[in-house]
Amino acid sequence: MDQLAAIRSVLANWTIDRDRVRLAVAPTIPHHCSDKFILGCADLAREYGVGLHSHVAESKVQAVVGSRLYGHTQTAHLAELGVLGPHFTVAHGVWLDEEDMARLGDHGASVAHNPGSNMRLGSGLADARAMLERRVNLGIGTDGASCADNQNMYEALRLASFASKVQGPNWRRWLTTREAALAATEGSAQALGFGDRIGRIAVGYKADIVFLDLDHPNWLPLNDPVNQLVHCEDGTAVESVMIGGRLIVANRRVLTVDLARLRDRVAEARERLAAANVDNRNLYQALEPVVGSHCPGLAAAPYHVHRYGARLD
């Protein structure tokens, strides 16, 4: 298939430092892909030693459609195809059931938990506690800027903590701040395939370090550092950033990017893309009422797990 050939070409010719930037093969959503394509992607991921990434059970619509198409969940279908493993990462996983989580945990797979995006798009509240109980490797992410508005990992940390707290009064099932912090560091590193080199400050690991100003109001007074990292820090106390031992930000000044030029390029790109997508935008606006009725209708269908913040009528 042309798509698989294109993916192979990119993987074979990737020249950026693989120690810092690693590709993954990402068949977008299982039911949007043929089984043949998914298996081809899995073969390429194994051949080139990269990750396999897919949006699985992100929304109830996906869960319902997957169940109707396969006769069981998307995750069960992927398990039947034999593509689950330590290299496999589920994006979102909001509507995973307990058996799905157990399958992922048994195969050493990961879930990229994106609480901000999940709430922004109305997808629901992922059960991070149940994932951890079933030995799923939990990472925390922001999702893309078009789905979560910003790329602030501190906000994602805070929302991951809060999202677990609004699902019920049993505080023992809430994510602790330590669990959230570990998911954002060690768990996320493992999900990216870098678990043996980043995510920890330890001998043999890369010196990827964010330096925070403890005189900033976020840290005054200094009480519990982990609690304050998760619940108080919003990025404004970041003083310097080191990647692989190299300072990228020093004294709140980015050393590697011309920010003024970047601003101009972003403005130019926005104008160019807006002009190029006039027809697409008009089509979207015409279809919005139709899609806006069809998808909630699917989401109203019965399903055996519930991940919304309120019961549907």
Image: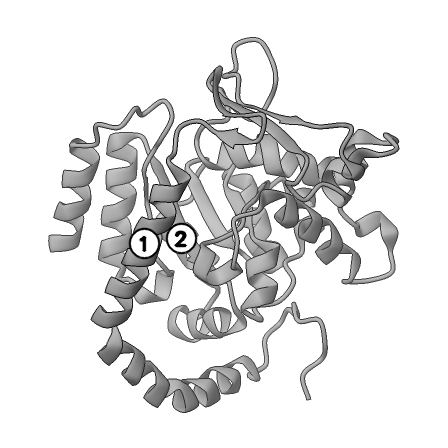
Q: Which mark is residue 27?
A: 1
Circle count: 2
* Three-letter code for the amino acid on which mark 2 is drawn: Ser
Q: Which residue is mark 2?
A: 54
Q: Position of residue 313 (x, y in %)?
A: 68, 89
Instruction: Looking at the picture, tell me which residue is in the foreground, 267 or 126.
Output: 267
> Label 1 neighbourhood size at 10 Å, few (<14), some (14-19), many (20+)?
many
SS class, disc 2: strand
Residue 127 sits in quarter: bottom right
Instruction: Looking at the picture, tell me which residue is in the foreground, 212 or 144.
Output: 212
Q: Residue furthest front?
A: 260
Cα distance, mark 1 to mark 2? 6 Å
Residue 241 sits in quarter: top right
Q: Residue at x 76, y 27 (%)?
A: 214
User: Is 178 on the left-hand or right-hand side of 146?
Assistant: right
Residue 144 sits in quarter: bottom left
* Three-letter code for the amino acid on which mark 1 is drawn: Pro
> Label 2 neighbourhood size at 10 Å, few (<14), some (14-19), many (20+)?
many
Quarter of the N terminus within the rendering: bottom left
Q: Residue at x 46, y 18 (%)?
A: 244
User: Is 262 on the left-hand or right-hand side of 151?
Assistant: left
Q: Residue at x 44, y 27 (%)?
A: 255
Q: Position of residue 109 (x, y in %)?
A: 50, 41
Q: Position of residue 24 (x, y in %)?
A: 33, 40
- Contact between marks 1 and 2 (CB within 8 A): the answer is yes
Q: Residue at x 62, y 67 (%)?
A: 124
> Is residue 194 positioned above or below 234 on the image?
above
Label whose residue precedes the other's in the sequence (1 or 2):
1
User: Is 8 on the left-hand or right-hand side of 268?
Assistant: left
